[in-house]
Image: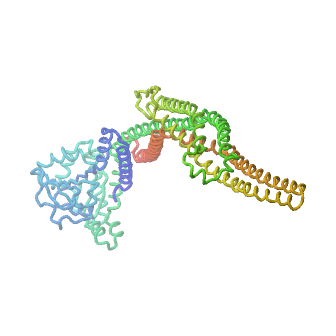
């Protein structure tokens, strides 16, 4: 196709401009830049304008059919009146009258997407239209094609019309010697030599001249039979190569492309700077948020270290509480209770029940540690508020508006929600720990084992007395004394076994209390760690979304920067190609 490399370049520029426009809109760019890009994209589609001039019956219509690759005379789209016809691309054939002397002809021909053709009536037909052609169309034409008939190239009207063309515009003029297949090559050579001599004499310059057979060119394009030979014979190869060169090296068009690229480059550079600034800002925001996250974690550790002495003191208090509870265990596991009948206790409703060891231990711990853990809750609250103030101070302009007011807190006597929740959790942990010891459940089994042993004591007294009396009656007093001593020894053994079982039960409870101090510390440490962590976790509701958003913005900005960098590289390549095509001297 004519001017393929130029149109490929223009298409690539259009593609990059569309990509730039899309990036601008996606990033919420200003409307002015978007409008500029839209205008630049629209201006790229401006077709080349070719004006075809010639006398009647010189083969202009055949020439245009060959150029378009379509026979308009057979479609009935071309009016038969002697008007100027302005051929443009359209989805269907249509003729729109513009003035009494001008019709716009729309046709679904791909060639017309990039080229508009002005077909003039014969120069020897309507003289009044010559001025319209020279004043309106020739100045905007990228190429003026004078078509002569090889049978009679000397028609005066065509040469007279050429004289009306301004000298400045003559550089766009080429000659086409049509119907060359009706002459011999020798005759064509004579005609072209003479036409060159005539133009030098009358206009002081040569015009590119091409002898062609539009008939053969049209057949080659449509019949497809011996296509290459027909095109070669038609002379259209040289004509199309020359037109392609004009399209490719059209200084005005290339300068316009260069100007388009400069404007687009300015918009691209502005966008890139803006996205780079946005990316750097997002990076700074991400760094600040990461520092705030680290500070939050460090603050949790610092607060836990402040609470560590309270755990140590609570463990010491527990040991003292254990000694008091051990005394209660001794009271519950006395010899009297071991020798007392269980059914007697059950029947005597007024008998005083032993105090619950679980309840007493819990009371002891509460009494000894209550004030301490209330002080700990104050420390926790102060640390939370201190970090909150730090967060507001460091997060101005990032997490919060620049004019945000720091929160104030009143440390009055009224218990805050944080302190109340913390105290409740500590009490609950102590209660669960004490209940888990099951001290009260351990008292009864030990006492029951001692009772089982103690029951033998009254049972053995009568047999001992009987044995003593029988030995004295049957033998002598010595035998009675021995029997009594043996019986007394047996009773002593039963009594001692009862004491041993009571002592074992007391010792088992005491050992259990002593060993449980580790469990108490672990229970309280776990609960305190959970509460402290939870107290600072609320800040994650602010930090996490902000950090995720900053990372998302940074990725988006980085993607846009890379996208614009690739566009900038493509722009540089296109700029270089425009310079390569631009002829020396510019315009």
Question: What kind of colouring is applied to the model shown?
Answer: rainbow
Query: In the visual, does 300 lie left or right of 97?
Result: right
Q: Position of residue 215 (x, y in %)?
A: 25, 67
Position of 461 compared to 377: left or right?
right
Q: Which of the two residues, 166 or 489, is positioned nearer the viewer here?
A: 489
Quick check: can you spot residue 569?
A: no
Front residue of 330/401: it is 330
Left or right of 330: which side holds 60? left
Q: Position of residue 272 (x, y in %)?
A: 43, 39
Quarter-of-image position of residue 368:
top right
Instruction: Point out the residue furthest to the front here.
Output: 473
Total labels drawn: 0
Name the residue located 70 percent from the left edge and 53 percent from the top edge: 450
Q: Is residue 265 above or below residue 495?
A: above
Quadrant, the N terminus? bottom left
- Residue 511 vs residue 58, the one in the foreground: 511
Give the quadrant of the C terminus.
top left
**Horizontal relation, residue 236 to residue 371: left or right:** left
**Residue 561, position in %: x, y?**
45, 43
Q: Pick the residue in front: 113 or 394.
A: 394
Residue 564: x and y in percent read: 43, 44
Specify the farthest residue to the bottom: 225
Q: Let me know if residue 266 appears in the view.
A: yes
């Amino acid at each position: 196709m004519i001017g393929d490399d130029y149109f490929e370049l223009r298409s690539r520029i259009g593609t990059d401009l569309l990509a730039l426009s899309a990036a601008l809109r996606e990033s919420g760019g200003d409307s002015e830049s978007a409008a500029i890009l839209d205008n630049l994209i629209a201006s790229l589609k401006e077709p080349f304008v070719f004006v075809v001039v010639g006398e009647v019956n010189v083969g202009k219509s055949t020439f245009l059919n060959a150029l378009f690759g379509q026979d308009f005379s057979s479609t009935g789209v071309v009016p038969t009146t002697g008007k100027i016809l302005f051929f443009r691309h359209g989805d269907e054939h249509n003729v729109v009258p513009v003035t009494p002397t001008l019709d716009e002809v729309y046709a679904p021909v791909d060639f017309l997407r990039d080229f508009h053709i002005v077909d003039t009536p014969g120069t020897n037909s309507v003289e009044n239209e010559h001025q319209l052609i020279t004043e309106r169309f020739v100045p905007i034409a990228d190429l003026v094609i004078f078509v002569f008939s090889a049978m009679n190239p000397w028609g005066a009207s065509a040469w007279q019309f050429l004289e009306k063309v301004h000298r400045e515009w003559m550089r766009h003029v080429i000659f086409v010697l049509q119907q060359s297949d009706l002459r011999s090559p020798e005759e064509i050579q004579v005609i072209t030599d003479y036409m060159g001599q005539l133009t030098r004499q009358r206009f002081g310059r040569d015009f590119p001249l091409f002898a062609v057979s539009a008939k053969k060119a049209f057949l080659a394009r449509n019949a497809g039979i011996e296509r290459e030979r027909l095109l070669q014979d038609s002379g259209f190869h040289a004509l199309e190569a020359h037109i392609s060169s004009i399209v490719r090296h059209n200084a005005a068009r290339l300068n316009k492309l260069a100007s388009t690229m400069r404007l687009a480059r300015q918009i691209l550079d502005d966008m890139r700077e803006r996205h780079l600034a946005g990316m750097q800002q997002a990076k700074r925001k991400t760094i600040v948020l990461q520092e705030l996250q680290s500070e939050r974690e460090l603050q949790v550790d610092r607060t836990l270290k402040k609470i560590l002495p309270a755990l140590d003191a609570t463990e010491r208090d527990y040991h003292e509480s254990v000694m008091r509870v051990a005394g209660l265990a001794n009271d519950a596991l006395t010899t009297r209770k071991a020798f007392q009948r269980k059914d007697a206790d059950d029947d005597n409703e007024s008998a005083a029940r032993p105090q619950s060891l679980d309840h007493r231990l819990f009371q002891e711990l509460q009494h000894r540690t209550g004030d301490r853990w209330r002080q700990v809750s104050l420390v926790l609250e102060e640390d939370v508020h201190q970090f909150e103030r730090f967060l507001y101070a460091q997060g101005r302009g990032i997490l919060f508006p620049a004019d945000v007011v720091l929160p104030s807190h009143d440390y009055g006597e009224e218990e805050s929600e944080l302190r109340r929740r913390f105290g409740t959790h500590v009490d609950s942990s102590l209660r669960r720990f004490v209940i888990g010891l099951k001290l009260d459940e351990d008292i009864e089994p030990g006492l029951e084992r001692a009772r089982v042993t103690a029951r033998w004591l009254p049972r053995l007294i009568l047999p001992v007395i009987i044995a003593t009396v029988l030995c004295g009656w049957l033998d002598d007093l010595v035998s009675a004394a021995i029997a009594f001593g043996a019986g007394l020894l047996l009773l002593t053994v039963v009594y001692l076994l009862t004491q041993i079982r009571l002592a074992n039960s007391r010792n088992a409870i005491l050992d259990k209390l002593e060993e449980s101090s580790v469990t108490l510390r672990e229970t309280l440490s776990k609960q305190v760690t959970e509460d402290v962590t939870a107290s600072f976790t609320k800040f994650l509701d602010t930090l996490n979304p902000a950090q995720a958003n900053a990372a998302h913005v940074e990725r988006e900005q980085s993607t846009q920067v890379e996208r614009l960098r690739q566009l900038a590289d493509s722009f540089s390549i296109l700029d270089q190609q425009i310079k390569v095509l631009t002829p020396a001297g510019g315009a």
